[in-house]
């Protein structure tokens, strides 16, 4: 037994998901039909990342994910202290300013730098230790998040490089 789900974007089928159920379990396959819809350029990365950072910073300040483990909804698993909340808020605002005020060539360079720094911070947390110039990287989720953001930024930079 199987089914096919079509992903439609602006009246165009851009992907098909095929899932097969059998005795061995569930197997799935995604077939991308139009890759233009799955690419992100540096400006889109900076806009999306900036909004996410501002929301994370504000959530930490309003006791949703910080500033202490006791006030975080995620408890000891994930929380941001006040310094991290301010860093997220300021970096998010800077990302939004860069996305809207600087030319595409500078957006690409900044996105590349964000990617490199994100990957290096993740590696620092795993290899050297949890203390990164005042930022607490003691939780493995911190390192995974920084690695994901770094790879995401590098991917956006790469896509933007191809589009220019």
Image: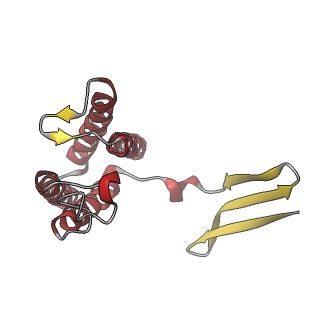
Which residue is depicted at the point 29% across and 61% down? Answer: 52
Q: Is residue 71 above or below residue 103?
A: below
Which residue is depicted at the point 47% across and 52% down? Answer: 39
Q: What is the quadrant of residue 45 in the picture?
A: bottom left
Where residue 148 sits: x, y (%)?
A: 39, 44
Which residue is depicted at the point 29% across and 32% down? Answer: 125
- Look at the image and tell me in which quarter the C terminus lies: top left
Would residue 44 be seen by someone viewing this image from the given angle?
A: yes
- Residue pushed farthest bottom? 11
Would residue 164 be seen by someone viewing this image from the given angle?
A: no
Q: Nearer the viewer, residue 126 or 153?
A: 126
Q: Nearer the viewer, residue 8 or 144?
A: 144
Where residue 84 sits: x, y (%)?
A: 16, 51
Q: What is the quadrant of residue 2 in the picture?
A: bottom right
Q: Nearer the viewer, residue 53 or 79?
A: 79
Q: What is the quadrant of residue 92 in the picture?
A: bottom left
Q: Is residue 78 above or below residue 130?
A: below
């Amino acid at each position: 037994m199987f089914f096919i789900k079509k992903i439609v974007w602006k009246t165009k089928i851009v992907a098909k998901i095929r899932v097969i159920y059998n005795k061995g379990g569930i197997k799935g396959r995604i077939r991308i039909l139009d890759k233009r819809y799955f690419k992100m350029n540096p400006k889109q990365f900076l806009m999306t990342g900036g909004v996410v950072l501002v929301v994370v910073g504000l959530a930490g300040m309003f006791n949703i994910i910080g500033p202490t483990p006791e006030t975080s909804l995620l408890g000891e698993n994930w929380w941001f202290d006040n310094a991290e909340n301010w860093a997220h808020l300021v970096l998010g605002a800077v990302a939004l300013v860069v996305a809207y005020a600087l030319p595409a060539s500078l957006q690409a360079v900044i996105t590349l730098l964000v990617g490199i720094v994100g990957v290096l911070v993740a590696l620092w947390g795993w290899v050297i230790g949890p203390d990164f110039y005042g930022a607490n990287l003691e939780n493995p989720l911190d390192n995974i998040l920084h690695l994901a953001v770094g790879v995401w930024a590098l991917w956006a930079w790469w896509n933007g490089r191809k589009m220019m």
